[in-house]
Amino acid sequence: MKTAAAGAQALPRSALPRAQAAIRAIALNTFREAIRDRVLYLLLVFALALIALSRLLSLLTVGNEEKIIKDVGLSAISLFGVLTSVFVGVSLVFKEIERRTVYTLLANPVRRWQFVTGKFVGLLAVLAMNLSLMSLALFGILWLRGESTWALLPGLVLILVELAVITAFALLFSSITNPILAALMTFAMYVMGHLSWSLMLLKAKLGSSASALACDLVYWVMPNLQRLDIKAAVVHGLPLAPGQFFFALTYGSCYALVVLALACLAFERKDFN
Amino acid sequence: MVRRLGAALLIAALGGVAGYTRGALDDLAQAAGSRDDELLYLPNGKYLSVLSLGHANLLADLFYLWAIQYYSDYERADRRRYVEHVFGSVITELDPHYIDAYWLGALILIVETGDLDAGIRLLDRGTERNPDNWILPYLAGWECYHAKDYDRSVRYFELAATIPGAPTAVRRMKAGLTARMGDEEQALQVWHSILEDPASDELSTKIAQRKVRELQTKVDIRALTRLVERFRTDNGRWPRVLEELVQRSYTRALPRDADDRVYAYDPRTGQVSSPAGRLLGEFGKK
């Protein structure tokens, strides 16, 4: 199997193009490696089956069938995307270490942060491809029914941003622990990301200023994935608040980059001996 | 060979036991019948929304599909219970914009359980959360209309008619009901507004034209009859001609009908009628 090490050869000499070339080579190999993963296909088939099933489910309803198709389709895209980013994400770095290909790779003029960033970009490309395939399946069903599909696009973009955050966490945790624990911790971040608003409720209940401060701290450190969820709005065709999409896009992207930077730092400090 | 045979026999025996016990369990469940409190502990949608991790809409759809199957099972003795809880506190709490769930829940509550107030409550909640949707107040108007609660019905039609996007049919309902309740002047105003609205559809415009003729004639005849009776009270006789009402300053001018003709008047009886003796509702005929 061709690994990232093979792709990282013959890099340019100057610093920035060399870094870009290294990241591109690793991303490309990660992409190739990930699309050979059976787990990916299994998840993709399940997601496509669920999207197709949404048409059958819609037959059971009374009223608006399109709503059921859109809800089931968007949730399937989001849930299976999360599962892909968790299970494929945590195994990417681990596989390189387990097969010892990481030694060969890092012996090349490739920095550790470039390796992690390349992995992130490669997996994000796989997720984007999967999301596009699942979206096409959903759009196809809706298009056959004469339904407009463009309104769903902002929701799909923010699902991809959410997946970027999850992928960054998967890489961070897989850089510091074993794959099972990393998968559990990544999934925990997903759950906490959707429940972080409850910290504000807890803060309101707590009298002491130290506890309230701790709640605030955890609230701002944890991702708020609810802010990236506009599925209900795009399904019902509700108007978004001015700037909401832009803020959500910026927030999610910046947060993912911060976690990716932490993952790079953690990988820099990792001792392979 | 013996091992394989033994394994096959073991598998067959275990399969048989599993099949038998499954049948016994099914019989026990059937004998126990359905419990009438199985929905009592169904959590409120607010709590389920927390557990859904951003997939509250999907959960609302699944509950909605389940509710359709549950409440359309006519053999279920307890199917009239907890309807308001399922539709009002679970499904529409999970997805407050689920219009279908509001109207279907209201329909089951009103038609199946005969609880008009609960149905209207559900539609009111839907209207409150979806102020841009005219369908829910329109349905509430219809349900009140069927229940002969015309006052409430007019209010709902009035509300629905003010919501942008409401079809002219909603205003038609309001006008028809207002006239039926005896406020013909108000109804006439609504029909005029439909007639003058360039956005009105062709059918509504035609109906409005007919209704304006009909109601205008009724209103005019009623007003003229009142004046004629006042004249008689003051003068001890009926006016000889309608123009006498203008000459004696009972009115500034006499109204003319939709065909721009004066109203017919019988000085022997004081009766005012439409020209050519046409009956109300038949003005379109020549």
Image (spheres, rainbow, N blue to C red):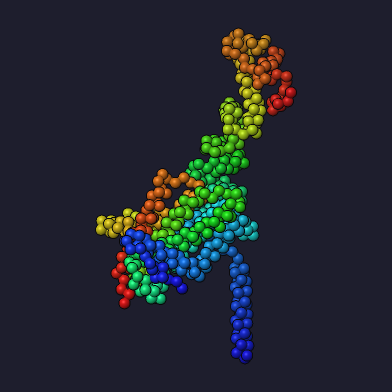
- Is A199 displayed left or right of B104 in the figure? left
Q: Residue at x 62, y 91 (%)?
A: B2
Where is residue A261 shown, x and y percent of the image?
33, 61
Picture coordinates of residue B79, whole percent (x, y): 59, 57
Going by the picture, which residue comes out furthest to the top? B247
Residue at 50%, 55% in the rendered image: B57
| B121 versus B281 height, above or below | below
View extreme (bottom): residue: B2
User: At which x and y percent is residue A227?
Assistant: 40, 53
Q: Quadrant of residue B210?
A: top right
Residue B230 appears in the picture as rendered: yes
Residue at the far right in the pictured view: B286
Residue B80 sits in quarter:
bottom right
Rendered residue at 43%/67% (across/down): A29
Q: Residue at x 31, y 65 (%)?
A: A265
Of B213 and B81, nearer the camera is B213
Q: Quadrant of residue B251?
A: top right
Labels in figure, total: 0
Q: Find residue B42 and report its horizontal and vertical position in percent.
A: 50, 59
Q: A20 or B190: which is nearer to us?
A: A20
Q: Is residue A6 left or right of residue B7?
A: left
Position of B184 relative to A147 (above/below): above
Q: Is residue B85 visible?
A: no
Quadrant of the frame with the C terminus of chain A:
bottom left
Query: Is A259 positioned to the left or the right of B122 in the image?
Result: left
Q: In this rendering, would A36 be left or right of A216?
A: right
